[in-house]
Image (tube, grey):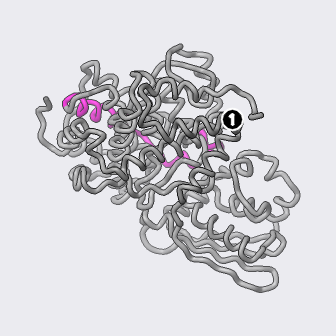
Amino acid sequence: MTNSTGPTSALCRWTCSTQYDDLPAEIRKETVTLIYDQVGGMIPSAVLPSCQPLISLLSKIGPAGSCSIVGHPLRTSVTSAALANGTIAHGDEVDATGQQGTGHYAAVTVAAGLTVGQYVSASGRDLCRAVTIGSEVAARFQSILSHHGTRNQFVASVGATMGAAVTSGLLLNLDADRMEHALGLAAACACGLASAHLEELHQTKSLNRGKAVEGGVLAALLAQEGYHGPREIMTVENGFFDAYLGLPKAGYEVVEGLGENYLMRQIAYKRFPVGGPNQTPLYAFLQLIRTHKLVADDIEQIEVSVSRGAFQTVMTNKHPSVHMPIILSLAAVYGDLNFTHIHEPRYRDTPEFRAFQERVRIFIIPRPGPSVAAERLQMGIIVRKRNGEKLSQNIRYPLMSSAEIEQKFRYLVGLRLAPDAVAALEQKLLAIESEKNVASLVSELEIPYSAPK
């Protein structure tokens, strides 16, 4: 048993003692949806340029193993598969975000769960339990990192590494003592440099998630073998929150309301394959286009007000899935925005698109005051028409319905699979709790390189 008595120890005792049936029914249901949505996004993302060089490297250097790489007819070791699957999980911007700065952990915890779940031949219930509890831990770490915000960092990778360790540790049946070592080791693996936004192919940003999954999985595997990490990593001097915030006492916040206040209730699924700060203005812009029957030639100017943190992200990162002026231009020219609009360069190479970008003024305006994570989903947009008319919307991102999430899954997976295969996979994922061994389900995600018929 663990010898420490601080919040890290308390967190580990809760993670290891909480059984699947102890979790609220709506949280268990949310976990199934989270896995379903995340897998749906991973399948088309697996072959994007943000992921392909890593897969090519792993196919050359190995090692061989029994763990699947989602979206590829390739297997490798558990840690290499963790790296690949985590990278694929954020290969595009379709993974879920959060309403209060707690999101973007699904790419890490689901990837870790699928990889280690296959490695140990876990049941569907065991996988769902591990993903639920690991996601709750990741959400709490990310929420605290985001709330205090003393460092400019990619908190979704930093905090989610700890969630990946918990997800993996639960599937490996670690006790509370070894789970505390796993968290200490995972803290040493965590990294999320915000400078990832400076790289234009989305590769570094995707790799951030891959390294978070790999680090969490490795930490749990090492702890299983008796490897030691520092105890009470959340609150000690030079520990997790001291290193990433300069606030070691912030670690006590992780266990506040633990087992009662589930941050997983704050998930916001993405309608569009674009970064979180772009979801609301894009939704509002498309609403204006459809309501007022706007076409590109009608528009003279677009103005969007965003939080300061969002402004830095959507203007620094030049990838079409994050850079807001590109996103709004695509939506204006094509009247919609889907996965192919973002990832096929031909949509940005047309005379219509180039003419729109040259003619229309797009202003992204940071709101005054401190950047608050909860404001990421609250945006305002103004469209000025060439005839002098002004159209505006100021809304908070409306959460997706179950029907919308299903439509999103079927569209994304349909980019790689035929309709009957899409339906079969959907049925299995939605019934994942009843799977006796998820290894066979994960192996079905090894999709050949061919277009759906």
Is-magenta flag for residue 193? yes
Residue in view at x 66 percent, y 50 percent:
319
Q: Does residue 250 appear in this view?
A: no
Q: Quadrant of residue 291?
A: bottom right
- Does residue 261 appear to the left or right of 339 in the view shown? left
Residue in view at x 62 percent, y 16 percent:
60
The residue lying furthest to the bottom in this view is 388
Horizontal and vertical percent position of residue 239:
26, 41
In the image, residue 6 sits, relative to residue 127, either above or below, namely below
Q: Which residue is mark 1?
A: 417
Horizontal and vertical percent position of residue 75:
56, 19
Horizontal and vertical percent position of residue 119:
43, 22
In the image, residue 426 sits, relative to residue 438, either above or below, namely below
Residue density around tag 1, few if under 14, some if 14–19, many if 20 or more, within 10 Å? many
Residue in view at x 38 percent, y 36 percent:
164
In the image, residue 125 sits, relative to residue 252, either above or below, namely above
Range shown magenta: 177-204
Is 318 in front, or is 137?
137
Mark 1 residue type: Leu
Q: Does residue 429 appear in this view?
A: yes
- Does residue 237 appear to the left or right of 147 in the view shown? left
Horizontal and vertical percent position of residue 271:
60, 56
Residue in view at x 15 percent, y 43 percent:
6
Quarter placement of the C terminus: top right
In the image, residue 452 sits, relative to residue 243, either above or below, namely above
The residue lying furthest to the top in this view is 64
